[in-house]
Amino acid sequence: MGLFKKLKGRVEETLEELNINERPRYQQPIYSSGYQQPIGQNLAPAIPERDYYNCNNNSGSNRNGGNHNNYNSGEQLNNVKGQGNSGNGKVDDLFSEPISLDGPVSQIPSSNNHPVPLPEFYQQKGPIETNNFYGNMLVEKQNLPVWTHPYSLWKCDDDQFWGLAVSCTTASQRVFGDDPNSNPCKYFFSPVGICSISLGASEFQCGIRFRIGECKRFSCGVEFTAASGGNSGKMTSKLVQGMGLITALYSGNIHPRITSKVGFQRLDPKGRTANGLYKFILTLFDSSKWVLFSNMDAFSLRNANCIESSSFQNSAIIQVGRVPKNGDEGAYDLAAGAYVEDVTLSGNVGNQNNAQYSFNYRIGGRSSSGKVVQWALPHQYHSADKCMSSERISNAELDSTCKGVMWAYLTKRFVMNERLPPQELQFDPYVEGKGCTGYSEQAIRRIREVASREIDSFDVVNASNTDSMYTSGKILDKGAFMLYVAGFVLKDEQLARKQLLKMKQAFSRFIQNKQQAPLVYNSTWKGIVSSAGLKDGNFYCDFGNCFYNDHHFHYGYHIHAASLVALADRKYGDNTFLNECKDWVNTLVRDVCNPSEKDRYFPVFRSFDFFNGHSFANGLFAHGDGKDEESSSEDYHCYYGVKLWGRVIGNVQLEQLGSLILAIERRAMNLYMLYSSDNDVVPANFKANKVSGILFENKIDHATYFGMNKEFIHGIHMIPITPMSNYMRKTRFVREEWEQMRLGELVRGIDSGWKGLLYLNSAVIEPGEAWKFFNDENFQDAWLDNGMSRTWCLAYCAGMGGI
């Protein structure tokens, strides 16, 4: 908390200057071919018309009577061919094909300059993940922990303990504050740096040389050699998310050595496994028990902190794992000797509403079962396919740092199922359990009055001309929502064309890369970054975009806005926008949501972490609590944009991929970030906060990087309010948060953009009151965030049933 307190103090000094329009993340850096034809043409289907006055309601009611037009903007795409799509619109594997194999668009120049140097690699091929769990091993001294869950691991360079350090904490060790007796408490974390086990070698005692390599989406490799360089022996290990056993492979003239800062109380031989490995149980002085497997015997306690073997092999394996909470020492026996070398994703949509995806483990070594032990987080085992039931190791559980209890599985593949967002959840306000309810004639008249004035006065061309991709993206998205309302809610051709012309002009600046801080393709870390901060390494420029911070937040706004403009241009314009912007938008999509390793220009899923179930915003920074994210809503807004973009351009793969990620996030976020009263994952004395605040890998802090106001902490998990909001933020949760946190009382005293945001959020449960607020003749524009329009707010409230 030391860093955060320092930042908090800095923020409080200038708190009155803060507002929602500029959302700095005050995170101080610690250091100053089966390939198919890409979509190249406009092959997108026409989007059907919709009768907004007499819209179909899933509950069977009709707001105004009359005939229903059963338009569903999520109708099946027929005869659409695109990257990864078969001729009938079915995608065989959502992760098999790239969006493109071409380089970034030509108007974005390439540069190999970057403030953060690459680490020393071994065997690194392809783009490097910048926001992944092993990020601490890429930057700085490379000695801060990384979390595979349930383990944390780090390069230990302390005398006598050189090597790969391992820790595995329990829920009873969590630290709560500021006042540990308060309910809810402000934060909690698991202790770091408890070196329960360190895997090393006798040759490391004069120092080590550390290298990282084989960096993939779910794993990385680490290599340790003696610092002297006179010994050819080395120790390597693969760090894999969810791994059950930590495996160290020794080759050459090197003598394994196992140490512990906690200390060894006992070392008990347990015979041999079915495949011939020697098994030991290590009891530490904190009473924790660990299992040890090796092809070497004769291990003995040299002292209370060191275990060595009197035997030697030129090629040795050592595996360690914490014994589950039930004390079952045999939980790992059938997996001993095997380890995961790589993890691949596969998945498909079986029908329009259900998807299946899996983690596929490429296994090295040999176990008696041919399988490995993998630990699963709650959102994974809650969605596990029925085939996983027989693979679960009965009652084998360990605690994660802040995401609940993990279950162990003996498997080669972990298969999960998700129900996708409803087909009608596309462009229009969506009510959980009811669908899209349409608009009354009275609402249409009032929305038209406001939209006419607002479109005339809103200069999106100049307002979006900022030096920040984040700020510009929000403003473009504001204009795009206004355009959508004019064209598809009001069906006002004149108004829609007026706004469309302005939106195309505003976007043209970015498509041509002529904004104040043009984009650059950084060939060092391989990604699209803002030139702001690239030369001088200033983290504060564009919220750290140059350091790969918040890319899914920033580019998500642009992707979503482009989807709406392309849709409107097809109906009200000359239908040229899509071809003009498609490669540029696809480049942004590839930066944050590239599905395939075949794309050599971008890492696979830079932001979204399939193992954790949500994205991480933190880029190339070392942090003692790991990666983090403070906005669940801007996270899912990105993939909502990807889903709509895929639909508009006719790329079924992208549309379904966006839908799958949204379904995973809905499940995971409602466990780890948004807390209904029945949540049993986060500690009981924390969940009454209702939202996480900043979710780290090792800590949850009910705070933001830009201030401690309640509206900041809750509002950052609302922004922006879109048709996807009520799908992600369930009605029950929104009601509990509104009532238990007394947001209705709070909002009356707010005089900034947060006021409008909180009221718009309340449209989920009190659409009539929300409509009254935005419809009031004394409404002030100061109550709108710079990414909000009164036009969209009224349309959203009316669409949620407000009038």
Image (tube, rainbow, N blue to C red):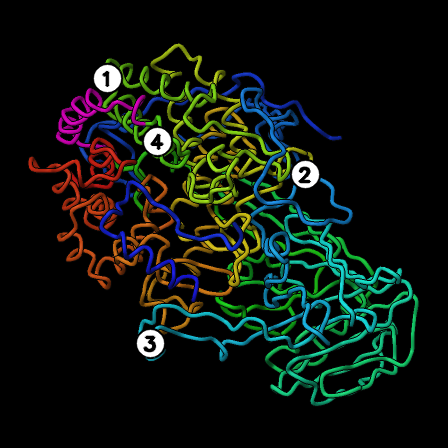
Q: Residues within 10 Å of mark 2 (few under 14, many from 20)?
A: many
Q: What secondary structure is the magenta-colored segment mainly?
A: helix
Q: Secondary structure at mark 3?
A: loop
Using the rendered view, name the quadrant where residue 276 is placed: bottom right
Which comes before the other along the chain, label 3 or label 2?
3
Q: Does residue 252 appear left or right of residue 172 in this picture?
A: right
Q: In what quadrant of the picture does the N terminus appear?
A: bottom left
- Dots 2, 4 in contact, CB < 8 A: no
- What's the residue at 44%, 75% (across, down)? 175
Residue that mark 1 sits on = 495
Q: Nearer the viewer, residue 169 or 642?
A: 169
Residue type for callout 3: Asp
Task: Measure the alpha-carbon separation of dots 1 and 3.
Answer: 55 Å
Residue 597, disc: 2
Residue 477, disc: 4
Residue type for callout 4: Asp
Which comes before the other along the chain, label 3 or label 4?
3
Mark 1 vs mark 3: give the one in front. Answer: 3
Magenta range is 438-463
Q: Is residue 770 magenta?
A: no
Residue 179, disc: 3
Residue type for callout 2: Glu
Q: Nearer the viewer, residue 438 or 82?
A: 82
Q: What percent of the width, then of the height, locates residue 288?
A: 63, 83
Q: What percent of the width, then of the height, locates residue 57?
A: 29, 38
**Res. 514 in view:** yes
